[in-house]
Amino acid sequence: MSRPRVLGESSSVKTALISDIHANWEALREVLADIREQGADRIFCLGDIVGYGPNPCECLDAVMDRCEAVVLGNHDQAALFDPDGFNPLALRAVFWTREQLEQGPGTAEQIHRRCDFLGELPKIHRDTELKALFVHGSPREPINEYVFPEDIYKQRKMEAFFGRIERYCFQGHTHIPGVFTESGEFIAPEECDYTFPLSDEKVMVNVGSVGQPRDTDWRACYAIIVDEPGERRVEFRRVEYPVEETVRKIYAISELDNMLGDRLRSGR
Ligand code: ZN
């Protein structure tokens, strides 16, 4: 769904893209505040709202409330259906998450609403005006496939991705932000000063992770598509949040391995 432009109003449209929240409420809260400050018109979420972190229900409620489009991530799917391909540590977190979704906090109605919402999430979202595809994993396997920076050396794999993209694809899943170009480059946000022009060249953009960054920067990460007449670009944002609060909560829950807290401090 795209917003009609009204003459006389500011003609720029800002679409904030958040992904891989992983039940980290403190990170999501600060990112939502930053999105408001940036004046974004709408928010899309690229999956993995839950899994690993201590606040799945709070994060789900905020995403249901604030996001215009949401796609399904592998952890969202695992929390509802039979998990596949998870290591024992991740599996324990999946089952703990499922318990939280089943028991609340909240009324029976809220609990149902969260589960229905997760159960009905689409695998992809398309925006025809932006010529953009939005997925959790890859354009080929939207829920589960990883596209890592080192994949630029796998030419056939990259061709298979770009063959499925009209112009732009926005994704998450690896928790490593950056831009993949069709000419075979990977550009990390700090290499392009956190802004990348969206031209006619096809690109895949990984928007990074709100709640569990893995690019050695502990700060929450998200992106904004700025769409104005004659110029379209993607801006990467890094947002500080009270990480020790989240770590303390993870330590206090025996089903969530302490490592899941430790890794937040180092962004790994
Ligand atoms: Zn994830």
Image (spheres, rainbow, N blue to C red):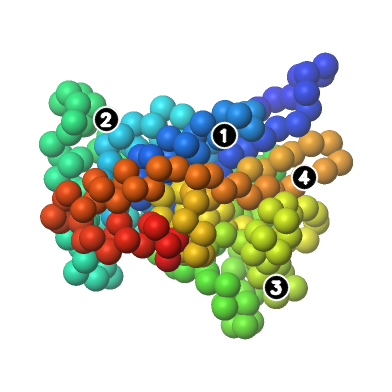
Q: CA distance from mark 4 to mark 1?
A: 18 Å
Quadrant where the N terminus sits is: top right
**Left or right of 52 on screen, residue 221:** right
Question: Mark 2 against mark 1, which lies toward the viewer?
Answer: 1
Q: CA distance from mark 2 to mark 4?
A: 36 Å
Please tell me which of labels 2 and 3 falls first in the chain: 2
Q: Residues within 10 Å of mark 2 (few under 14, many from 20)?
A: some
Q: Residues within 10 Å of mark 1 (few under 14, many from 20)?
A: many
Q: Find numbered disc 2 in the image and state the secondary structure of the residue it sits on.
A: helix
Mark 4 = which residue?
232
**Left or right of 112 on screen, residue 66:** right
* Dot 1 amino acid type: Ile
Query: Circles 1 and 3: CB distance less than 8 Å?
Result: no
**Left or right of 116 on screen, residue 207:** right
Residue 125 seen from this side? no
Q: How many marks?
A: 4
* Dot 4 amino acid type: Arg
Mark 2 = which residue?
113
Residue at image point 83% right, 16% down: 8
Please tell me which of labels 1 and 3 falls first in the chain: 1
Residue at image point 59% right, 68% down: 161
- Residue 198 sits above or below residue 230 on the image: below
Which residue sits furthest top?
Answer: 8
Mark 3 = which residue?
185
